[in-house]
Amino acid sequence: MLSTPFRPRLLQSLKGYTKDNFIKDLMAGIIVGIVALPLAIAFGIASGVSPEKGIITAIIGGFIVSAFGGSSVQIGGPTGAFIIIVYGIIENFGIEGLALATFIAGILLLIMGIFKIGSIIKFIPYPIIVGFTAGIGLTIFSTQIPDFFGLHIDKIPSSFAEKWICYFNNINSINILSLTFSVLSVLIIVISPKISKKVPGSLIAIILLTIVSYILRKYMNIHDIETIGDRFSIMATMPSPQGLGLSFDKIQYLLPPAFTIAMLAAIESLLSASVADGVTGEQHDSNTELIAQGIANAVVPFFGGIPVTGAIARTMTNINNGGKSPIAGIIHAVVLLLILLFLAPLTKHIPMACLAGVLVVVAYNMSNIRTFKKLLKHPKSDVSILIVTFLLTVFLDLTIAIEVGMLIAMAMLLKRLSDSTRISVFTKKINLSAESESNKDEHIILPKEVDVYEIDGPYFFGIANRFNEVIRQTKSHPKARIIRMRKVPFMDSTGINNLFSLIQASQEEGIHIILSGVNEKVRKILHNGGISSLLSENDICSDIHIALNRCQELISMDNKQ
């Protein structure tokens, strides 16, 4: 029976919870809630939904991730990584399609957590993560150009190359005031950490520039700066849950984008939790975290929300401001709820150019240019994975990028494993002086009728055919072949089938096959694979000496016949 790996960190944190801990969580939660507001709005708008949808996602998703997650300090909500995916789904399938895709992604995440796939996701190669996050960063940057420069464009193309052609064609429509606000926003975000790291620069930029924009409009009659209120009407209320219109046909064609959402949510949330572990010294529960992410993504679509995942920047803000337990994340969600209910109308004054500046900085941070440059100096195989994943993310699709990146990574891994497996042939003597089977300076002189083949490494499909080629190239016809397998850690089905065929072919030629140095794990695999039907127990030996004695015994029996 499958045991469900669901152990919310909140329950553990409440044991021995003190008033001092609550005060720290309260302060951290309030600060993170305030910090999360502009990001939730920006990510919502950039994703193609209304601002309050981003806030609702941060409220519901943030609450669920903290209440049920496997990390003490993880903060959940909408993130920049999903902007391009969400925008593309809305463009192709509409808001209803996004809601259903997010729900399906939630179910997939639940399945991942229940079946303990959390630890496996950590094995995704680093070049793939850097490649697609850099690609997402560049793509987000490209989507913010119109608001950053205040360009007047009626219809923006969807493809990356066509976007930039369109921008250059409309370069004459730059709004200098919008550009000024965008640049000031970036400068404030960059400079503010040098003054104080307690309050994020994005929040300072939005507050200051919103005040300036309001003054320009109210008292100087300057309306050249477009604000959130010019594009959206923000509903200062929590929506009632709505149905998703589930059907088998819809699930079928929305499964690929849902899988992309699930994989990205899993990768980003576990990466965020791992980064937090490095700072706090704790160890998150990856499978519980995936279950929490699954619940969050399955619930938010009923309220019009967008995909949820762990947010590294907000999680680090929580840690830096003293957050000790999931209570801080729950408080952050409550703060956002209060802001939505009582202060939402004020958000309509936020300039779009300011949000564009915030997202440009987010895009730059996601691109991780320094790490990208470092990886370019790594082995060519890693560089190829990095470049291919990056280019496919930018020019095609994130799903394709991850799939192709993983295929290349697996192919490279198999090649490395194959190259690391050596096959040696001994026809005259074996030097045992450097081997664990003998402590003496010893040589074994092989009988003329015996050949020895040694496999050093995994015996899998990558080297199975190569082993056959080595035997054919030897062009000898001994009376016995010893296959030394003391350094074979595992075998796969292809290796077993290859060995089975080799034994059959050798026996038909009157050549005995003896296996030497087989460990217990490989011996069990051989037994289950049917090798025991061809060889007796005496033909599978523990070391080379016993194997040679067995050969001489069999050869003597043949000679007597």
Image (cartoon, rainbow, N blue to C red):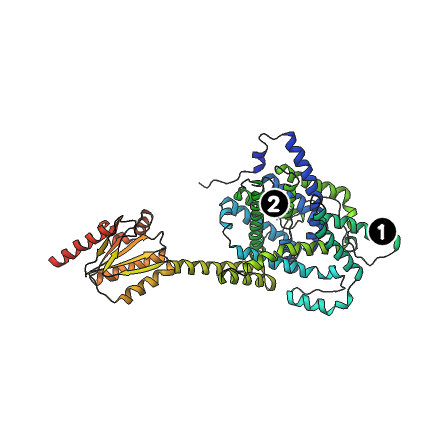
Q: Which label sits on residue 296?
A: 2
Q: For this rendering, which residue is in front, 560 or 195?
A: 195
Please identify, in this view, whether the residue under mark 2 or under mark 1 is nearer the observer: 1
Do we see residue 561 in this rendering?
Answer: no
Question: In the rendering, at what x and y percent does residue 451 appear?
Answer: 23, 60
Identify the amino acid type marked 2.
Answer: Ala
Classify residue 389 as left or right of residue 234.
left
Q: Is residue 449 above or below residue 338?
A: below
- Residue type at numbered disc 1: Ile
318 relative to 545, above or below = above
Residue underneath mark 1:
215
Seen at 85% across and 54% down, the residue is: 217
Mark 2 lies on a secondary structure that is helix
Q: Nearer the viewer, residue 256 or 41?
A: 41
Q: Residues within 10 Å of mark 2 (few under 14, many from 20)?
A: many
- Could you tell me which quadrant the C terminus lies in? bottom left
Q: Nearer the viewer, residue 500 or 120?
A: 120
